[in-house]
Amino acid sequence: MTDLNATMLNLSVWALPLVFAVTLHEAAHGYAARALGDDTAERAGRISLNPLKHIDPFGTILLPGMLLLMGGMMFGWAKPVPVNFARLRNPRWGMVLVSLAGPGANIALALLGVLLLHLLPEIPQLAQGWLASNLDKMIFLNALLAVFNLLPLPPLDGGRVAVGMLPRHLGFQLARLENVGMLIIVALLFLLPMLGDRLGVDLDFFGVLVSGPVTWLMEHLLMLAGPSWAG
């Protein structure tokens, strides 16, 4: 197999799981918001399972593709679904539920991927390897998105969950990080590990905060697929 063929095959087994993962994540926020009283996403045409409604050309396609080709960590984003938390019937707890809907959808997709592993023996042998790779990436990417988005830092879903559950004065202080939250995330994921490499110090907070919980979640999900996958 040529390098080009290998690259295209690698991209093909990452692209579909990634698109479905970010699409259902964002759509779940919109569905939850509508159910709890806010139709902002619906009026914007964002309550949809159509991937084109949620894909960000750079964050969903170009950046993950470049990182994958360079052998780096998988990182990206979709277009956020607009939610007006003030319009929810219970703004504080509604924000918590709407925020949890995205990671919850990813865990459900990861579980679906595990269950679909049981169907592999029924698939023609020629397609089994490709489909198995897709399902493997489906489980991994959805576990990764669920865990990463539950980090308690706005604008991530976990940050909004923390804002809603903390005492009001503490929640207000955390919510003020919304505008700089992504900068903090980029620093944790990329800048601090680079600095640590130069200093000879392990500053890989991503490994501690995300990789460990993702591995734990995948191991427990794969137990449902049987010993050959759990191992």
Image (tube, rainbow, N blue to C red):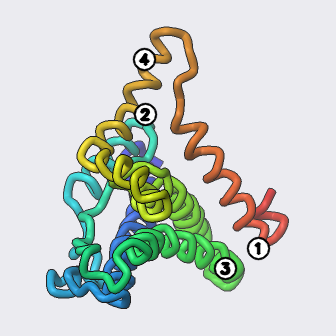
Q: Identify the mark nearer the N-term, 4 or 3.
A: 3
- On the image, the x and y values in percent for residue 2 come to 42, 45
Q: Is residue 134 visible?
A: yes
Please, what secondary structure does the residue beneath circle 2 have?
Answer: helix
Earlier in the chain: of badge 3 and badge 2, it is: 3
Residue corresponding to mark 4: 195
The residue labelled by disc 1 is 224
Residue type at mark 3 is Leu
Marks 4 and 3, Cα distance to the nearest angstrom?
41 Å
Q: CA distance from mark 4 to mark 2?
A: 11 Å
Q: Position of residue 62 (x, y in %)?
A: 25, 50
First in sequence: mark 4 or mark 2?
Answer: 2
Residue at x 44%, y 75% (from the top left corner): 93
Do the residues under discs 3 and 1 have CB atoms within 8 angstroms?
yes
Nearest to the observer: residue 175 or residue 123? 175
Query: In the rendered structure, which amino acid carries the disc numbered 4?
Result: Leu
Looking at marks 1 and 4 on the same chain, the residue that comes earlier in the sequence is marked by 4
Q: Quadrant of residue 96?
A: bottom left
